[in-house]
């Protein structure tokens, strides 16, 4: 029951995050990790409502990321804002809707649950621990 409650709280937190931020995913054609992450990102969007903007770092388009836009300087801006230089694609950045802050969440492929966990950690969202358990009064 406690695990189920924690999972529900994480889902609520991630849905709230979708009103404050979105994801920018740096991809490239021929990248096997990018291909593996496409369905994971789609599922994340379905479950949380987070918007995703795929950016092709080389300007090419792959079948898995047909809506990828060419880099128009956004990669440089993401590196500047986050202070992180990704070395592997896909590189997933959490970007505040104001465009003032960005955090590198992941480089390479990971599971949906790992991605959700990283988003929760980096976004600073707090998950209540065992909120249904009340402490006993001191005697």
Image (cartoon, rainbow, N blue to C red):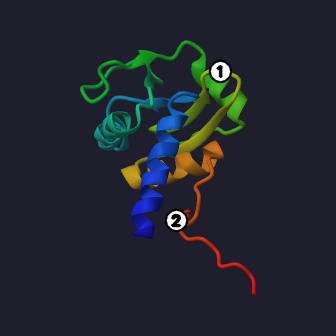
Q: Is residue 88 visible?
A: no
| Quarter that holds the C terminus | bottom right
In the rendered view, tell whether residue 134 sits above or below residue 88.
below
Furthest residue in direction bottom, as rendered: 139
The answer to whether mark 2 and mark 1 are in CB contact below 8 A is no
Locate residue 73, reporting x and y percent: 60, 15
2 or 1: tag closer to the N-terminus: 1
Badge count: 2
C-alpha span from label 2 to label 1: 37 Å
- Residue at the spot x=36%, y=44% of the render? 33
Q: Residues within 10 Å of mark 1 (few under 14, many from 20)?
A: few
Name the element at disc 2: loop
Furthest residue in direction front, as rendered: 139
88 and 13: which one is in front? 13
Q: Residue 99, which numbered label?
A: 1
Determine whether, in the image, residue 35 is placed left or right of residue 90.
left
Determine whether, in the image, residue 75 is placed left or right of residue 116.
right
Furthest residue in direction left, as rendered: 63
Name the element at disc 1: loop
- Residue at the spot x=54%, y=36% of the render? 17
Q: Residue 132, which numbered label?
A: 2
Q: Residue 65, which numbered label?
A: none
Locate residue 47, reporting x and y percent: 35, 39
């Amino acid at each position: 029951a406690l695990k189920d409650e924690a999972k529900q709280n994480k889902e609520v937190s991630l849905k709230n995050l979708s009103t404050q931020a979105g994801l920018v995913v740096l991809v490239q054609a021929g990248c096997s990790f990018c291909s593996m992450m496409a369905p994971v990102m789609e599922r994340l969007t379905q479950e949380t409502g987070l918007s995703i903007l795929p950016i092709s770092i080389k300007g090419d388009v792959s079948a898995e990321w047909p809506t990828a836009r060419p880099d128009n300087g956004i990669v440089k801006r993401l590196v500047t804002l986050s202070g992180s230089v990704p070395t592997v694609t896909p590189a997933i950045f959490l970007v505040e809707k104001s465009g003032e802050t960005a955090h590198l969440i992941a480089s390479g492929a990971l599971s949906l649950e790992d991605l959700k966990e990283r988003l929760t950690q980096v976004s600073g969202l707090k998950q209540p621990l065992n909120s249904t358990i009340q402490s006993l009064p001191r005697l």
